[in-house]
Image: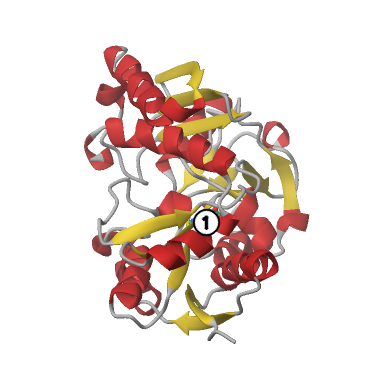
Amino acid sequence: MSTPLRLGTRRSLMATTQSGIVADRLTALTGREVELVGVTTFGDVSRAHLTQLGGTGVFVNDLRGRLLAGEVDFAVHSLKDLPTKQDERIALAAIPERDDPRDALVGPVRLRDLPAGARVGTGSPRRVAQLRLLRPDLEYVPIRGNADTRIGKVTSGELDAVVLAAAGLARIRRDGEIAQVFEVGEMLPAPGQGALAVECLADRDDLIELLSAVDDPLTRAAVAAERSVLAALEAGCAAPVGAFASGDGHILNLTATVVDVGGARSVRKSTSGPSPAAVELGRELAAAMIAEGADTLMGEQAH
Ligand SMILES: NCc1[nH]cc(CCC(=O)O)c1CC(=O)O
């Protein structure tokens, strides 16, 4: 009997749910037991300073610190929170099959049925920018906090609706309150949205091999293309950049957009190409978008 693998996870419901799903799938496929190790990250204890600390990257870095310290064997992150530049000491050992990549509106009615002037909460420039294209007559209110806190502002009447990732809502079992799931054509998700990243130390070859059991090559190719767009635009997770790719393992279809935060102008382009060239596909699409002025839309805050 081998010892259980230690999976480091934040203690939030969303984090423990997604860690538990990966743990169960790994055990089912490999027979290896997994033990969840709850970790309180620096980002969890000093939420107020999250903006100064550099957004969700703090959670990722804290869990990576536990890997480097040998306290846990592997970690599961929301892929869209990973910086585009990989730490070479850490291996992205698996990208499991993606959940719903789309954004969702939590509120009483669909976006088109909200009255003019309705207050819609979202902290994401990407969502605000695309929502402004759909409904320029609404008021967009920046909000922070976890998904429960955000939904609470609708329940309390402080806001009329909030927009969150459908996958995250499902993981905290609040998807019953979704009034509308946006089609990717009307609201491009963040690169990697709905996907998970399984990381361990880069020098643990046996563990990387074991974790590859939960890897999904179709998802891996799609998110590689999406993240390549983001990297080539030199944009971070707070940039008004949406990207979505899907494919059959041979051909990958990729669409990306950059919208100026005022929602007045946008650049949007699609392409397709062979799946193994996912990274090049994303890079070329970004270059074509920059040629159409995408970089001038991002503003200072995107860098
Ligand atoms: N930035 C926070 C974050 N990171 C991952 C998710 C949702 C789940 C996912 O995209 O996999 C969320 C919340 C949200 O955007 O609504």
Give the answer, above or below, for where 124 lies relative to 144: above
Give the image quarter of residue 114: top right
Residue closest to the eye, 118 or 264: 264
Residue 13 vs 114, above or below: the answer is below
Which quarter of the figure is the N terminus placed in? bottom right
Q: Measured from the top left, where is residue 60 in percent x and y?
A: 37, 64
Image coordinates for residue 255, horizontal then vertical, percent: 50, 24
Q: Disc count in the image?
A: 1
Image quadrant in which you'd find residue 175 = bottom right
Q: Is residue 244 left or right of residue 45?
A: right
Label 1 SS: helix
Task: Decide if residue 123 is in sight here.
Answer: no
Image coords of residue 251 (percent x, y)? 56, 22
Residue beneath disc 1: 212
Q: Position of residue 150 (x, y in %)?
A: 56, 61
Disc 1 crowd, CA 10 A, few/some/many (<14, 14-19, 20+): some
Which residue does the image show at 60% across and 42% down from the upper left? Answer: 101
Residue at the spot 49% in from the left edge and 18% down from the top edge? 273
- Left or right, residue 172 beside residue 140: right
Which residue is pictured at 61% across the width and 79% down the height?
A: 33
Answer whether residue 179 is visible to the viewer in this image: yes
